[in-house]
């Protein structure tokens, strides 16, 4: 097996840097179906880059390929524990093939890393999955792509990605830390998801209990400020690096909060929405709404909505989430995948007096605070693991 000389200066005593495709325990690295043909409603599910987010495969709107096409692409017919890697857009995002993904396939925009039995036993699959999330790996992947919103990473460059491995005994210790961190992160993710569901349920019950006060209806723009999204990079040059959020990140959020993005843009500070803005994005059948915890520039096809107070924000957030299906009428374009600012601004909402809004906020705000605590703890755990892997506390996102 060959080592790369590049980044050798990062190797601590006993560490070695390998090309990803040559890491001991990696069996193969392949890309998916190049010519999937027409969607076959009864065919084999095919995972695309856009189906992968937050470490999991979203299975709500999968493409399907004919069995004959799948037979021609057996090299990426999935097995349990295969690592799926995004090659287009959000370079390096990953998900793990689960037992029910057996014999599914992937699109050309996704790579499949397969491991040997020894590699799985030694935790090489877990190591590479975490490694692909480090700043060091992401920076190298971006440098090898065009760097645009829809950048594409050639499979050969993924295969050449340097991966540093410590001595066996140290790797075993770090893998144990990874396992503990992942268990706690999974628990935090469930807490955040349940807190989100509980806040939505409180809103439904609260709305029923105060139905007599919800007769007044107002358009969205009477109680908020609505602005449209922009493509990444279209903000005026100069200024500061700003977090840029895509509609897909809103749609794939597991909670009602967004506290990190995978992309940035450049522009004046006032080009970003302030923390607390609501982000609204559509897909066929529903419109998702989350609240941002950080300043962000909203992406093209979505909207950002600002309010005057926390009570207004809480009510508007949950009434929009409750209206996620009927809000589809405010979307436009092919398959209603972009928000119409004009139609959304005039969408009628039930709007109670300030006393009712403040009463609801007193119930909802503690739940939202708990969600943010869980998300922050997950980021801290991630940084802890990455710092052990790379020796740099700032080494990962």
Image: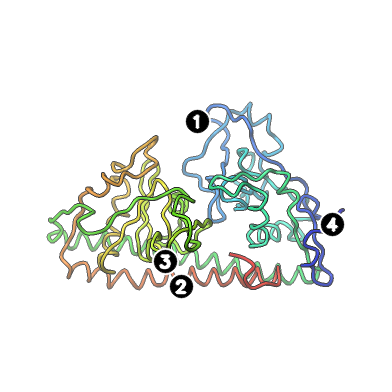
Q: Residues within 10 Å of mark 3 (few under 14, many from 20)?
A: some
**Mark 2 highlights which residue?**
373
Q: Secondary structure at mark 1?
A: loop
User: Where does the image place residue 120, in percent across and percent down from the top left?
Assistant: 74, 56
Callout count: 4
Q: Are marks 2 and 4 in contact (CB under 8 Å)?
A: no
Q: Residues within 10 Å of mark 4 (few under 14, many from 20)?
A: some
Q: Residues within 10 Å of mark 2 (few under 14, many from 20)?
A: some
**Mark 4 highlights which residue?**
3
Q: In the displayed image of the protein, which residue is found farthest to the right?
A: 1
- In the rendered structure, which disc, 3 or 2, sits on the residue that comes first in sequence? 3
Q: In the displayed image of the protein, which residue is found farthest to the front?
A: 238
Distance from the alpha carbon under mark 2 to that under mark 1: 42 Å
**Mark 1 highlights which residue?**
41
Q: Are marks 2 and 1 in contact (CB under 8 Å)?
A: no
**Nearest-to-viewer mark from 2 and 4:** 4
Q: Residue at 68% across / 29% down in the picture?
A: 72
Q: Quadrant of residue 328?
A: top left
User: Where does the image place residue 14, in percent across and percent down from the top left?
Assistant: 84, 70
């Amino acid at each position: 097996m060959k080592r790369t000389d590049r980044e050798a200066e990062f190797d601590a005593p006993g560490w070695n840097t390998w090309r990803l495709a040559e890491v001991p325990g990696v069996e193969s690295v392949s890309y998916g179906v190049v010519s999937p043909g027409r969607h076959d409603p009864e065919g084999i599910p095919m995972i695309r880059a856009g189906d992968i987010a937050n470490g999991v495969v979203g299975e709500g709107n999968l493409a399907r390929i004919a069995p004959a096409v799948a037979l021609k692409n057996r090299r990426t017919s999935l097995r349990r524990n295969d690592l799926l890697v995004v090659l287009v857009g959000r370079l390096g995002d990953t998900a793990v093939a689960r037992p029910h993904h057996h014999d599914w396939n992937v699109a050309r925009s996704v790579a499949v890393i397969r491991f040997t039995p020894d590699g799985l036993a030694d935790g090489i699959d877990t190591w590479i999955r975490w490694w692909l999330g480090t700043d060091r790996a992401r920076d190298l992947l971006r440098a090898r792509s065009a760097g645009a919103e829809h950048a594409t990473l050639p499979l050969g460059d993924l295969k050449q990605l340097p991966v540093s491995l410590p001595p066996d005994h140290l790797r075993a210790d770090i893998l144990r830390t990874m396992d503990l961190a992942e268990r706690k992160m999974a628990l935090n993710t469930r807490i955040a998801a349940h807190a989100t569901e509980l806040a939505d349920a409180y809103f439904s019950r609260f709305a029923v209990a105060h139905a007599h006060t919800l007769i007044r209806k107002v358009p969205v723009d009477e109680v908020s400020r609505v602005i449209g999204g922009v493509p990444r990079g279209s903000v005026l040059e100069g200024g500061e690096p700003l977090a840029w959020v895509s509609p897909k990140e809103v749609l794939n959020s597991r909670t009602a909060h967004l506290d990190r993005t995978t992309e940035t843009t450049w522009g004046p500070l006032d080009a970003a929405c302030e923390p607390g803005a609501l982000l609204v994005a559509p897909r066929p059948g529903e419109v998702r709404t989350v609240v941002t915890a950080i300043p962000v520039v909203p992406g093209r096809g979505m909207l950002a909505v600002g309010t005057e107070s926390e009570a207004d924000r809480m009510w508007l957030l949950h009434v929009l989430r409750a209206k996620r299906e009927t809000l589809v009428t405010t979307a436009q374009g092919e398959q209603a995948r972009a928000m119409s600012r004009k139609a959304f601004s005039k969408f009628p909402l039930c709007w109670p007096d300030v006393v009712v809004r403040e009463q609801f906020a007193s119930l909802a705000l503690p739940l939202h605070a708990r969600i943010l605590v869980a998300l922050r703890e997950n980021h801290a755990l991630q940084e802890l693991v990455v710092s052990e892997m790379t020796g740099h506390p700032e080494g990962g996102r």
